[in-house]
Image: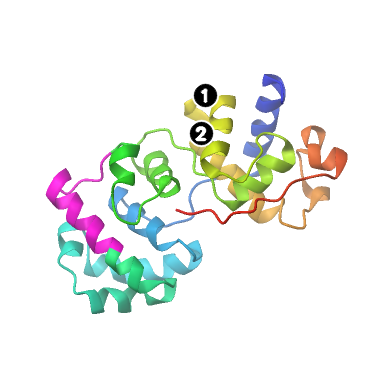
Amino acid sequence: MKTPAAVTRIFDALDRHHPGADTELVHRNAFELLVATMLSAQSTDARVNLVTPALFDRFADPAALRAAETAELETLIHATGFFRQKAKALIGMAAILVEQHQGQVPPSMAALTALPGVGRKTANVVLGHALGVPGLPVDRHVLRVADRIGLAHGDDPVAVETQLGKLLPPARWTRASDTLILHGRRICKPKPLCSMCQLTRDCDFFRTGVTTKPKKRVTR
């Protein structure tokens, strides 16, 4: 286990490494971020950002999305992959927002994960980046980087979220996730660029060269 001083040092270094870290999904409100995050499953943020401008021009709010024709919606989101399942989930999600939440994205984990196509990771993204509620999304990058550094271990995203959450005050959760994700994309890749990393002082992988690999695909 890392000492509190080491944890603070690690996340301060991540902040310096990745200033301005934030979700890379372009959005203007909680509804748009929810849709974009749902679309990003098995896709990339860059590809989703190419799709969402036309999508949001056509379906600007839950009421409009609820009334979407499935074929039209599938065409608009086709490039993100798994478009049939995603279209069904998006229309179902929008219907519940209208019918149960007055067209608003609810600011709670339980209500968000009750929506079709919304898992804990997606809910954490929306809570932390659009609703002002601390959230700690865990994806494959967070699993890899947290394991290598020695902050958390395991291939269960919920268990790793719990471990990381105990190390940090809630106010730091969202940014901690953002910096871990960017570190995994840019520096601590499957083949890590340790010579470019500012965390080597506290990194178990750098010190020992030993890491475990997550076995399960992270779901949203």
Q: Residue furthest top?
A: 4
Residue 72: image quadrant is bottom left
Relative to 143, does residue 185 appear above or below in the rendering? below
Q: Residues within 10 Å of mark 1 (few under 14, many from 20)?
A: few
Structural distance between the alpha carbons of marks 2 and 1: 7 Å
Span highlighted in magenta in the image: 89-106
Residue at position x 31%, y 48% in the image? 30
Within the magenta stretch, is there residue 92? Answer: yes
**SS of the residue at dot 1?**
loop
State the mark number for residue 169: 1
Give residue 198's position: percent from left, percent from top. Answer: 76, 40
- Tell me, for residue 173, which label it has, or none: 2
Residue 121 position (above or below residue 161): below
Mark 2 in CB contact with mark 1 (< 8 angstroms): yes
- Amino acid carrying label 1: it is Pro
Q: Is residue 207 within the magenta segment?
A: no
Whether residue 20 is visible here, answered yes or no, is no
Dominant SS in magenta = helix
Where's residue 108, x and y in %? 31, 36
Residue sitting at 67 percent across and 27 percent down? 7
